[in-house]
Amino acid sequence: MSQSFDVGERTLWNPSNGPGRLFVDVAKALEPLAELPSGIGVGRWGPGDPDCHGIDLVAFTAFTDALVRRYRESNHLILRSLLEGFVATAIVLVERGGGTVPALSEQPGTPTRDVQIGPGGLAAQAGPDRLAELAAEHSAAMAW
């Protein structure tokens, strides 16, 4: 069995059940951090198919952009580490859907939260390179 992540009739990703369900669960868990809904909902086969996930590309792009922005503005190593895998995968889905993530090319704002205390606490903000590299790795591993 597998999961399906679709925009309309187009499948963007078709992972096995474990990674697919985890991606949906992590998206739900990150909605409060992004302060936006994920945009992942019921797929084209309707609410009776728990393995098919429709993506509202506009909402999902805004959600992904908010997470990338939070990642880039934070100097907190643990927060960034926790976000990296999900965000890299989300970037691939946005791009496969024909969208872009503006926060990848913008200068990040000044961090006002998630300040790390102790060693590494004054680490620089995260640049987009790490996320771009991970997204490229993820894209190569993500079945359409």
Image (cartoon, rainbow, N blue to C red):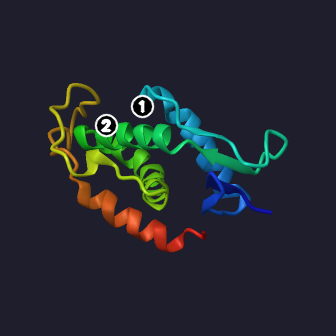
Q: Name which quarter of the figure residue 112 lies in.
A: top left
| Labels 2 and 1: the sequence-earlier one | 1
Q: Quadrant of the C terminus?
A: bottom right
Left or right, 41 with reference to 46: left
Q: Residues within 10 Å of mark 1 (few under 14, many from 20)?
A: some
Residue depicted at 18% across the width and 44% down the height: 125
Q: Nearer the viewer, residue 123 or 51?
A: 51
Q: Quadrant of the N terminus?
A: bottom right
- Callout 1 amino acid: Ala
Q: Residue furthest right?
A: 48
Residue 38 placement (x, y as % from top left):
53, 36
Relative vertical location of residue 86 with respect to residue 59 in this rendering, above or below: below
Q: Name which quarter of the figure residue 41 lies in.
A: top right
Total numbered badges shown on the rendered structure: 2
Q: Nearer the viewer, residue 107 or 99?
A: 99
Question: Contact (CB < 8 A) between labels 2 and 1?
Answer: yes
- Callout 2 amino acid: Arg
Q: Residues within 10 Å of mark 2 (few under 14, many from 20)?
A: many
Residue depicted at 59% across the width and 49% down the height: 23
Q: Secondary structure at mark 1?
A: helix
Q: Secondary structure at mark 2?
A: helix
Residue 140 placement (x, y as % from top left):
48, 74
Residue annotated with mark 2: 70
Residue annotated with mark 1: 34
